[in-house]
């Protein structure tokens, strides 16, 4: 098994306790923010619910380091998502809603919600397979030998693992521009988070034959609009602080300063950008995100993740920990860097009040994009640009189309990042119910709350945590409709679901 780069920081934790067989109305696979709201919504609706968490952590990215909410329009956040941010305000004893949240506060709120709703939370449950009969899931199995049976299943995992196991059609990567007529599809020139200073990309400067520096892919840039199976870069969203109690950036196991030689040369040219997207969360605690040409995004390292098995994902996970922790340690300590860079880096450290069990490092990798269902309706750039209106919305997306870089290559002897898209919306747009259930004729009792049916371009707006919470809320209520109406999830009465959502405070237009 791959050894952890930092003590206690693992993706795949061994199961604990004896296996069980559990029969409930609704099984939610994935304890992301959307998984929590799906479970809570279904339980409050009178259903018996089991929530299967992959690890010990619940709340996905909202409780995993993403303290600054990617909001868009506050007026478009409703239902349990809005209730969550009001509860954050209550926790801080401030007027609500409160759009920034420390991870431990978010986790406490989610845990309280689940306990109050009577949800059966099962941790360290790793999907091993499903049993299908007549186009429906009859049983979900986990690798500890447990079996979970339900009338309706909700896949709230960022990866869409359950929908894939159920044979639902999905895609991975970037469609070509011609697939849906999208101008921002496929390969795109990166205007942001790009190298803006000259730096040599070769191991021996000026000698292409010596090979490329670590972090640079040997392939071509590609033609604009060309499709591929690449996904945008992942990273960890860290809680960092300027407090005197800050935890110094740790040296990860297997640290190799040579993998940051491209960054050293960029710093030498004047390109120190580490804290450009480090934003206040609470007091002296900040949310540290990727910023600039060479930062916490591990560009090019995430492409296998969506369809990889758990052992391979553990390797990818540890490589991301090792890369990002090593990046910070390098900038804080390497004697080949200017003293002012090292001092500026050490002005921050990991927040001591967060993630104590995992070396103050988030246990949740920021899986910005993985599988995406291909359903009866695919949300596209046309929706984001206001050219369409859907008759069956269950949530509103309002954040910019925001996709991070997919690869780093050499063009004309210089390193170039490719794939960053940051484009405004024409207006907030509705995510339709048809985009969270499989197409007719596929699995009839699964609802997808995170890996929804959207093109790469449109998913770059949909993928925000408040939207996932609202989609989870809708999925939880829709599960109850399918149970009560004794129909497939594709056949429920949308009008009834709409009324239930509106009564619960959803914003649908």
Image (spheres, helix red, strand yellow):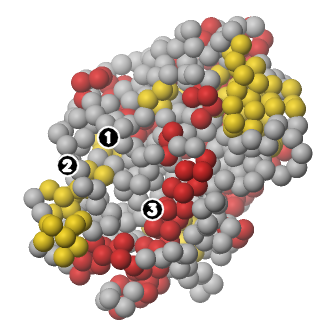
For the point 23% across and 73% down, the residue is 203
- Quarter the N terminus occupies: bottom right
For the point 43% across and 87% down, the residue is 333
Instruction: Return the residue at label 2.
Output: 220
Give residue 256's position: percent from left, percent from top: 43, 77
Q: Nearer the viewer, residue 282 or 359?
A: 359
- For mark 1, give the secondary structure: loop
Instruction: Return the residue at label 1.
Output: 424
User: Looking at the image, is 381 positioned above or below residue 256?
Assistant: above
Give residue 33's position: percent from left, percent from top: 64, 43
Q: Tell me the mark number nearer the camera, choosing from 3 and 1.
A: 3
Instruction: Using the numbered discs, state the Cα–Cα distance from disc 1 to disc 2 in whole angstroms.
Output: 28 Å
Residue 167 visible to an observer of this rendering: yes
| Circle nearer the N terminus (2, 3) | 2
Left/right placement of residue 144 relative to residue 160 reads: right
Instruction: Using the numbered discs, state the Cα–Cα distance from disc 2 to disc 3 in whole angstroms.
Output: 27 Å
Instruction: Return the residue at label 3.
Output: 289
- For mark 3, give the secondary structure: loop
């Amino acid at each position: 098994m791959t050894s952890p780069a930092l003590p206690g920081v693992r993706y795949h934790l061994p199961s604990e306790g004896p296996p069980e067989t559990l029969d409930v109305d609704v099984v939610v696979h994935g304890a992301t923010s959307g998984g929590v709201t799906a479970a809570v919504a279904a339980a409050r609706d009178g259903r018996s619910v089991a929530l299967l968490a992959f690890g010990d952590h619940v709340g996905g990215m909202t409780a995993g380091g993403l303290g600054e909410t990617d909001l868009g329009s506050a007026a478009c956040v409703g239902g349990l998502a809005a209730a969550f941010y009001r509860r954050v305000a209550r926790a801080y004893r401030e007027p609500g809603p409160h759009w920034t949240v420390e991870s431990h506060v978010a986790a406490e709120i989610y845990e309280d919600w689940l306990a109050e709703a009577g949800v059966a939370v099962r941790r360290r449950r790793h999907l091993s397979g499903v049993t299908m009969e007549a186009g429906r899931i009859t049983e979900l199995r986990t690798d500890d030998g447990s079996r979970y049976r339900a009338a309706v299943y909700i896949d709230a995992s960022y990866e869409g693992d359950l929908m894939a196991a159920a044979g639902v059609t999905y895609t991975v990567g970037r469609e070509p521009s011609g697939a849906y007529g999208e101008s921002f599809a496929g390969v795109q020139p990166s205007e942001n988070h790009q190298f803006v200073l000259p730096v040599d990309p070769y191991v021996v400067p000026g000698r292409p034959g010596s090979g490329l520096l670590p972090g640079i892919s040997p392939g071509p840039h590609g033609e604009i609009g060309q499709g591929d199976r690449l996904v945008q870069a992942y990273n960890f969203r860290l809680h960092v602080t300027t407090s005197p109690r800050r935890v110094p950036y740790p040296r990860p196991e297997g640290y190799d300063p040579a993998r940051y030689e491209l960054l050293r040369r960029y710093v030498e040219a004047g390109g120190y950008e580490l804290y450009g997207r480090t934003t206040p969360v609470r007091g002296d605690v900040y949310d540290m995100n990727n910023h600039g040409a060479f930062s916490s995004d591990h560009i090019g390292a995430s492409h296998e993740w969506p369809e990889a098995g758990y052992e391979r994902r553990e390797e990818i996970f540890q490589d991301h920990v090792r890369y990002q922790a090593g990046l910070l340690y390098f900038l804080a300590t390497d004697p080949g860097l200017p003293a002012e860079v090292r001092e500026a880096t050490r002005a921050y450290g990991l927040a001591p009040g967060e993630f104590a069990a995992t070396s103050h490092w988030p246990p949740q990798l920021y899986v910005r994009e993985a599988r995406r269902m291909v359903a009866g309706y695919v949300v596209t750039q046309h929706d984001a640009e206001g050219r369409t209106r859907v008759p069956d919305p269950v949530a509103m997306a309002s954040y910019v189309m925001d996709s991070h870089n997919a690869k780093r290559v050499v063009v004309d002897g210089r390193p170039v990042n490719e794939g960053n898209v940051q484009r405004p919306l024409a207006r907030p747009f509705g995510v339709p119910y048809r985009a969270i259930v499989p197409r007719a004729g596929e699995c009839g009792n699964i609802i997808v709350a995170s890996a929804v049916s959207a093109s790469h371009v449109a998913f770059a707006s949909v993928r925000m945590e408040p939207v996932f919470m609202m989609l989870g809320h809708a999925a939880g209520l829709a599960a109850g409709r399918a149970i009560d109406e004794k129909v497939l999830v594709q056949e429920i009465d949308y009008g009834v679901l709409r009324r239930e959502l509106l009564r619960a405070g959803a914003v649908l237009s």
